[in-house]
Image: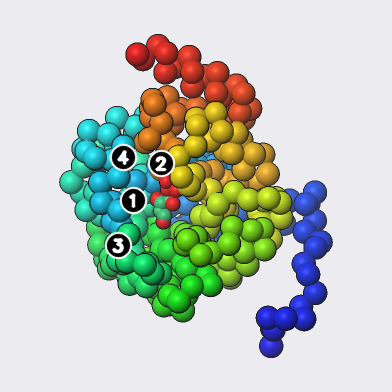
Amino acid sequence: MAEKEGNRLAKNFHLDTPHVNHAFHVKGADHAEWGMKDRLSRIFSPKTGRTVMLAFDHGYIMGPTAGLERLDLVIPALAPGIDVFMATRGALRTCVPPTFNKGIALRCTAGSSVLDDDMSHEVIGVDVEDAIRMNAACMAVQIFIGSSGEKTSIQNLCNTIDAGNRYGIPTLGVVAVGKDMERTTKFFLLATRMLAEFGAHIVKTYYCENFEQVVAACPVPIVVAGGKKLPEEEALTMTYRAIAEGAAGVDMGRNIFQAEDPLAMTQAVARIVHENYTDKEAYEFYRDTAKQSR
Ligand code: R5P
């Protein structure tokens, strides 16, 4: 039985050795079946193995946050720069034309609003049949490791993985960081590995110190969230470091739709993710593109 105390600290992550089962372009999916691989390929480009996901599911807890006041005006305009829309079914059905044919990461949990002091108690809010109807490339479920809702959120994740596995739909496990949760390497090593071992096909987490250890110890692809709005240059540096240290892409929200020029920001992020731009090159691209569109 594993114990909380007394375990020897993990230290040998073999950072120079790539993941062994890596014939398919998505880490950990070599042995998945056809439908699952097809959906993963709608998320991760078969050319680069990476993805740019635009997260705009904030309204389901925050209401109309800055930059997302009018989903119908904002989101379609950003489609050219991204691979995947990550959102609720309500936002997608009402504000995003199905003609874009992007991958859909469907937010499948629901909970309480920012007015609740403890938002860690979520439920599954979308039936797998509706995910199929939405042609979801994956279902997204948030997990609250170390908080009062930990167990329920793990149950939500496992139920969603089971439902998705029946139909070949991958599950994206989202590591939540509430106000009391630490953002340390130790926490992200624990949380990301737990989600992958429960069967999540993709894990979304935050960039942290020693991020390459978190990536190495997680047997499925990691995509990084953007977090609170940073100056554009800093957000691009964070993106660059995450990709250089092994992230398979981003699932970014506020640092895109709250940027001064959100479309230029999606394109700059995509250049790092898919074209190996450095953060400096991407920021120059962002500045030039934003200037031209003024
Ligand atoms: C978190 O649960 C949500 O999935 C957010 O959409 C996510 O954290 C990404 O948004 P941001 O980049 O604004 O943190």
Q: Nearer the viewer, mark 4 or mark 1?
A: 4
Query: In which quarter of the view is residue 258 placed?
Result: top left
For the residues labelled 4 and 3, the Cα–Cα distance comes to 17 Å
The answer to whether the residue bearing label 1 lies less than 8 angstroms from the nearest atom of ligand 1 is: yes
Report the residue marked by disc 3: 115
Residue 148, percent from left and from top: 45, 76
Q: Earlier in the sequence, mark 2 or mark 1?
A: 1
Structural crowding at the residue carrying mark 2, measured as other residues with C-alpha within 10 Å and reported as few (<14), some (14–19) or many (≥20): many
Residue 18 in sight from this viewpoint: yes
Q: Amino acid at mark 1?
A: His
Q: Position of residue 175 (x, y in %)?
A: 50, 61
At 22% from the left edge and 53% from the top edge, which residue is drawn? 90
Question: For mark 2, what is the residue?
Answer: 254
Instruction: Work out how far the residue at label 2 is from the one at label 1, CA to CA, in angstroms.
Output: 9 Å
Q: Is the CB–ligand 1 distance for label 2 below 8 Å?
A: yes
Q: Residue furthest top?
A: 292
Amino acid at pointer 4: Ala
Q: Which of the two marks, 3 or 1, is nearer to us in this view? A: 3
**Of callouts 4 and 1, the N-terminal one:** 1
Q: Which residue is mark 4?
A: 66
